[in-house]
Amino acid sequence: MLSSDTFVSATMKPFIVAENIAKAYGGVQALTGVSLSIAPGEVHGLVGANGAGKSTLIKVLAGLVQPDAGQIVVDGVPVSLPTPHHATDLGMSFIHQELAFIPGMNVLQNILLGVPKKTRFGMVDWRAAARDVAPIAQRVGIKAPLFASVKGLSTAENWLINICRALVRNARLIVMDEPTASLSAAEAEKLFAIVEDLSASGVAVLYVSHRLDEIMRLCSRVSIFRDGRSVGCLESTAITRPALIEAIVGGKVEPLAAAERRTVVRQEIALTVKALTRAPKVNGVSFELRRGEVLGIGGLVGAGRTELARLIYGADRADSGVVTLDGASFSPRNPTQAVKAGLGLVPEERRAEGLLITKSVAFNLQIANLANIVRSPAWPLIHRRKREALSLQIVRDLAVKTPSIDTPVGRLSGGNQQKVVIGRWLLRAPKVLILDEPTRGVDIGARGEIHRLVRELAARGMAVIVISSEPDELPDLCDRVLVMVEGRIVSTLEGDAITRNAIVEASYFVGGRPIQEITI
Amino acid sequence: MSMVMSGGRRLSPASRAALGFFARYATIIGLLLMIAVFAFLSPRAFPTLSNFTNVLNQASLAMIIAGGLTLAVIVGELDLSIGFAASLHGVLVTGLIVANKLPIPLAIVIVIALGALIGLVNGVIVTKAKVNSVIATLGVGTILTGLAFAYSAGVPIVAGVPEAFLQLSLGRWLFGIPNNIVIMAVVLGGLWILVERTALGQEIQAVGGNPAAARLAGINVDRIKILGFVVSGMCAALTGILLASRLGSGTTSAADSYLLTAFAAVFLGSATMRDGEFHVLGSFVGVLIIAFGFNGLNIFGAPTFSQYIFQGAILIVAVGLASLGRMISES
């Protein structure tokens, strides 16, 4: 069923072949060795769990990232892609989830950005340009006039403009990253038609998506990545939902076991969330969190989990919904109020949102704890010995590997940086601690230590929420797991029902039903 | 550890360390070199206690305004209104004393409070109305210039300035230390303690270092930013008052040029001892470099235009050094 990855269609020479591409960021191996070959006119699917290496491979193909090993062959010739320009020149075009337009320019100008244009008397001949572009725009179904502003156009139209842009540059391969993520069903349908049309005219498409029904419908071949490796390439009739999930997860998918209640946690409720909504990312989320409980929130990237955490934490404002903390209504207007009320957040983006990278370990540990290290409220000079003692205590308790507490935190490894962010909250002992992807980019050893620490905090009565995109992480750690899909909780797993397979299975569901069953 | 420069060159650890040292101490080495060269070329006029005291006295006003600006830039904003504000404050304080016959201390308190208010306005426009600080403070500064002209009708207030007000800046204190230096030392000392030693100072540094992280750590980022503008505004007021006292008049636009001096000093300071981080002591060193540079140029009779060229060039060098330091520390 799983064929070799270096498969080459007998009838057609591949347009592009990537062989054994490897890439490490710092100490983290993003790609260990992935291979991929795409024939002209082929719609090739690329699937894999979060962190499987899909984005890194796309960046390599786009010339944004230089691989450590492996080679890329275009039309049978080995090529190097030191810059995005080289990739464009070879006929590759990339359409990302966040589409980038220049808002002040019209549709035509955006389509022709970076393309040499005809001139008349030294000035760009926009009318001639429009004549050239019009048939292509019509082919992909752009309804907006070419001279209209791109402001206010829908995401779907943005996609069409991007596809048009690719065709104007004579793209032979268009890479689409989660193309239907923010499209309506009807818009997605149109996109599928265009993809099929592109394919028929010999333009290859690399279709990257979590939505397996789309993959099954459109793709003639599907490559599956897991943990930075190619684990298989399915063809035509072999592309089935169970086969895909099995390859993504790396094991047989067991049917959902009946939920079995764990009776260990019977403490009072710390946090309740009722119908919390912030369109479009969070849609009516409700759950309860007890003291001493570790609650996992699983799902795919973009399912709205980080957004949910930010709502509870007051970093964003909710459209509607009610949150109570220790039985009292709780609606923080900003994180300052949330922290005062007894919440703590370990954010997803450690370097961007968690740490002051050039500041010392002690600075980063104490920044949420300043009231406890001043000489007195009336004389708020920092008590340096108190600061040092408390910092050293955390460094020792969490086994943070650092030369000293005055070392800039940016010099520490990812795992130790994460311990510093968690350690910051230990000093405050919040009632509810939210950890967003706590072990991303963290080595195995530190990961185990962080997990132990989370369990220990819960044992001391703290209520803990762990958001993780790694299906492996939550079963070890949590008493209960909620799975979110498209801003909703689609599944609640408890006790022995919390398995990696159950989480993955639920992550690919919409509204409690498999995506496959929903007719688009 | 090797670092990659923007061009893709890799540096050996030794050259990285050397470059790091250069970026950190280039300003201080430059200051000492400059003093040494001037002392060598003009051994009688330059390296004397009275000349050094004079330089520091002259520089004190710039140090105060640069110290205030340091707070604004630490919280990650630019305050371009300070020079114009100081000019208005100079006109206003003289006017209050001469025309309204207010007691000198009261006039000073009122003007400093006004400086705080202007800072508050800047801060609220930037944090609540989300106007870019360059635009907001440039707009406010221009309005202030207009107000200064409206208040004084463009005519310097010279007549009737009491001797006691002049003595504020011209007087000397214990051991004959000029008042300006004493006031500057108190202000910069206070700012240094605020930033480096208090809980509030830690929050100020956190907001400048990474506002997103500071916010999620529970710090009220807007309030801290507004505080930065308020301190900057108060220091601008103090500089305006001392300048009016030194000149013996309230003159519109008299303090405008402090804006450039303060910026050059603050950026020079960020390249001093720390890798591109703004700090009070650094800004002090920054003003010192500019002041000694001017002093040397004066002693050698260099034409006035050379001062502008010197100051402009030093601003560019300072920003270059600061970003070099930042690049090395982040690699």
Image: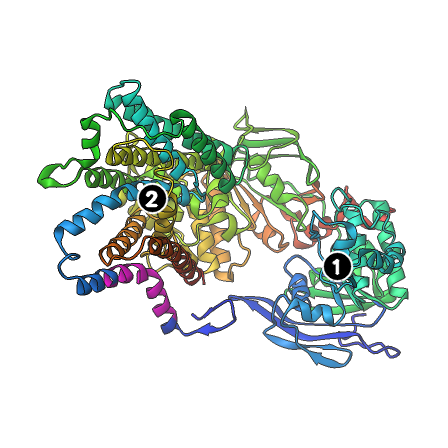
Residue A206 in picture, x, y percent from top left: 77, 64
Quarter of the figure with residue B147: top left
- Residue holding disc 1: A123
Q: Amino acid at mark 1?
A: Met
Tag 1 and tag 2 share a subunit: no
Is there any visible trace of residue A462 in the rendered image? no
Q: Which residue: 28% across, 33% down?
A: B244
Task: Give residue A164's mark.
Answer: none
Residue A111 in picture, x, y percent from top left: 77, 56
Q: Nearer the viewer, residue B132 or A333?
A: B132
* Residue A338 among those drawn in magenta: no
Magenta-highlighted residues = B16-33
Query: Which residue in the rendered view is the most extreme toward the left?
Result: B175
* Residue B18 among those drawn in magenta: yes
Task: Give residue B66's mark.
Answer: 2
Within 10 Å of disc 1 (Cα), the crowding (few <14, some 14-19, many 20+) is: few
Q: Nearer the viewer, residue B224 or A375?
A: B224
In the visual, does A421 lie left or right of A333?
left
Vertical arrangement, residue A203 with respect to residue A17, above or below:
above
Q: Nearer the viewer, residue B294 or B263?
A: B294
Is there any visible trace of residue B206 in the rendered image? yes
Q: Which element carries disc 2, helix, strand or loop?
A: helix
Of badges 1 and 2, the one in the foreground is 1
Vertical arrangement, residue A187 with respect to residue A57, above or below:
above
Q: Amino acid at mark 2?
A: Ala
In the visual, does A171 lie left or right of A293?
right
Q: Which residue: 55% across, 56% down?
A: A440
In the visual, does A288 lie left or right of B84?
right
Main secondary-structure element of the magenta-colored stretch: helix
Residue A117 in picture, x, y percent from top left: 77, 63
Query: Which quadrant does the N terminus of chain A fall into?
Result: bottom right
